[in-house]
Image (cartoon, helix red, strand yellow):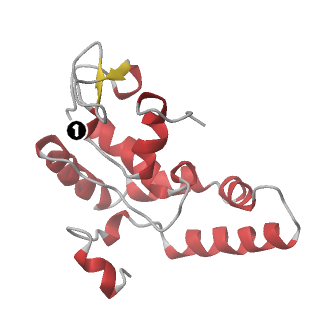
């Protein structure tokens, strides 16, 4: 559940897009065990061990949840949407998968999502696809967007 203090920070919380409890619990147990075993990257160990990506994608695209994604994709076409989570690394978080599913559903421009050729826009903090003109502000995902666009915003890209 969303903490009360966070309610002022977000437009809405969509529980249907959250990972199922059994998947979260399995990931947490394995991550804790990996930490106790001094694994280099407990988060990644847990992500792979529970097949998080495959299981979450199956969950979020089944039942009525696919309709929630379709509805959210319509919103994305009209305004910026931020996908947020408590996990710091977007690459090991359900929001990266939710983003991919939204990109598949939303009409976000003429380029397929992975075919954009990002370059600096007129405004220094904005990047624009050099092929289709699609701007980075069209779909934002917090840290995920920052990680993917860091080389174009002056970061080291790592």
With 12 as the anchor, is 86 left or right in this view?
A: right
Q: Callout 1: helix, strand or loop?
A: helix
Position of the N terminus, as image quadrant, is bottom left
Farthest residue, direction right: 37
Q: Is residue 126 above or below residue 48?
A: above
- Identify the residue position indicated by label 1 in the image: 138
With 68 as the anchor, is 153 left or right in this view?
A: right
Q: Is residue 81 above or below residue 121?
A: below
Which residue is at a point 43% across and 34% down the rendered structure image? 149
Q: Find residue 115 and report its horizontal and vertical position in percent.
A: 39, 19
Q: Find residue 23 and report its horizontal and vertical position in percent.
A: 57, 68
Position of the C terminus, as image quadrant, is top right
Farthest residue, direction top: 131
Q: Find residue 90 and report its horizontal and vertical position in percent.
A: 51, 52
Which residue is at a point 69% across and 52% down the rendered structure image? 48
Which residue is at a point 44% across and 47% down the rendered structure image? 144
């Amino acid at each position: 559940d969303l903490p009360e203090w966070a309610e002022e920070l977000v437009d809405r919380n969509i529980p249907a897009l959250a990972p199922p409890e059994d998947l979260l619990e399995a990931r947490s147990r394995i991550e804790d065990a990996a930490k106790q075993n001094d694994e280099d990257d407990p988060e990644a160990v847990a992500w792979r061990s529970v097949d998080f990506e495959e299981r979450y994608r199956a969950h979020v695209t089944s039942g009525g949840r696919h309709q929630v994604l379709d509805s959210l994709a319509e919103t994305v076409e009209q305004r910026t949407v931020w996908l947020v989570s408590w996990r710091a690394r977007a690459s090991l978080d359900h929001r990266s998968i939710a983003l991919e599913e939204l990109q598949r559903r939303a009409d976000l421009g003429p380029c397929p999502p992975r075919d954009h050729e990002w370059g600096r826009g007129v405004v220094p903090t904005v990047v624009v696809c050099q092929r289709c003109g699609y701007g980075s502000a069209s779909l934002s995902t917090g840290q995920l967007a920052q990680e993917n666009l860091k080389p174009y915003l002056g970061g080291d890209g790592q």
